[in-house]
Image (cartoon, rainbow, N blue to C red):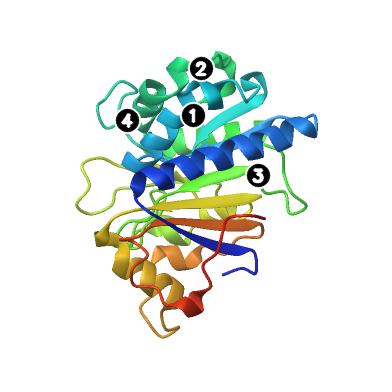
Amino acid sequence: MTEYRKIQILTDADQVSRVAAEQFVELARRAHAEDRDFFVALSGGSTPKRMYEYLAEADSRDAVNWERVQIFWGDERYVDADHADSNQRMTREAWLDHISIPKENIHPITNQANSPEVDAADYANTIQALVPTNRFDLPEFDLVLLGLGSDGHTASLFPGTDAVDETEKFVTYAAPEGQNSPRISITFPVINAARRIILLVAGDNKKQVVKRTLMGSKQEQSLPIDKLRPSGELLWLLDTSAGSGLSDTVGTNAASF
């Protein structure tokens, strides 16, 4: 992993969401203090949804200059924007519809071309055009939010798909086995280039994959999450259930960078 990794174990999923929201506000304000926009790639899921609801509350809503926040998505199901499974729809209903953010600051993944491959390439072009780059010409988000599946997937980079090993494209697509729709996802080179990555992980069903990822043997079968090798800061936010398999030697601590 990285020397900048920090792990925080919190009481429950709601606390994971709350601390993630606090981190978002802190990082956004830091970017604004540097007189620049704040670039974030969002995640789907129930724990991020609660985070977004916290960001819609008055304390968070009033603490951020939303005119200088640029919203992207790290992954999306290949469905219409108003579909029940759409990450974009969930985010709008939980958060974006309740804050004063310019429409042009919201950059969703779309299915307008009716081709996941074409729409993935279009989104890569959008990211390349708008997101500042690092010295390696990779898009450098201020924050990338991620979840972690019990199968070791993160974003929409699932085991057994070519998307996991994609290194040339910024955005790719896949049709993971057992999923109802194709997925579009940013790739690990983009994820790993972020200034900060926050993993929001909650639930007893995540305990084994968390333990295996943070304490596992190098000889174990590779999972997508193993390709998370950040160049910036990495914060694991776990609830007590997800973190219950970790030993004290992992080095959990408070989330201060």
Q: Is residue 41 left or right of residue 164?
A: right
Secondary structure under the numbered disc 2 in the rendered image: loop
First along the sequence among labels 3 and 2: 2
The amino acid marked with disc number 2 is: Ile
Task: Give the camera-side residue of 226 and 252.
Answer: 252
**Residue 109 visible at all:** no
Coordinates of residue 44 in the picture (x, y in percent): 37, 39
The amino acid marked with disc number 4 is: Ser
Q: Which residue is mark 3?
A: 139
Q: Is residue 256 left or right of residue 134?
A: left
Question: Marks 1 and 2: CB-CB under 8 Å?
Answer: yes
Q: Which residue is mark 1?
A: 55
Coordinates of residue 71 in the picture (x, y in percent): 55, 29
Quarter the C terminus occupies? bottom right
- Label 1 to label 4: alpha-carbon separation: 19 Å
Coordinates of residue 210 in the picture (x, y in percent): 38, 67
- Label 2 to label 4: alpha-carbon separation: 20 Å
Callout 1 crowding tier (Cα within 10 Å): few <14, some 14–19, many ≥20: many
Question: Marks 3 and 1: CB-CB under 8 Å?
Answer: no
Q: Which residue is mark 2?
A: 99
**Residue 140 visible at all:** yes
- Label 3 to label 4: alpha-carbon separation: 24 Å
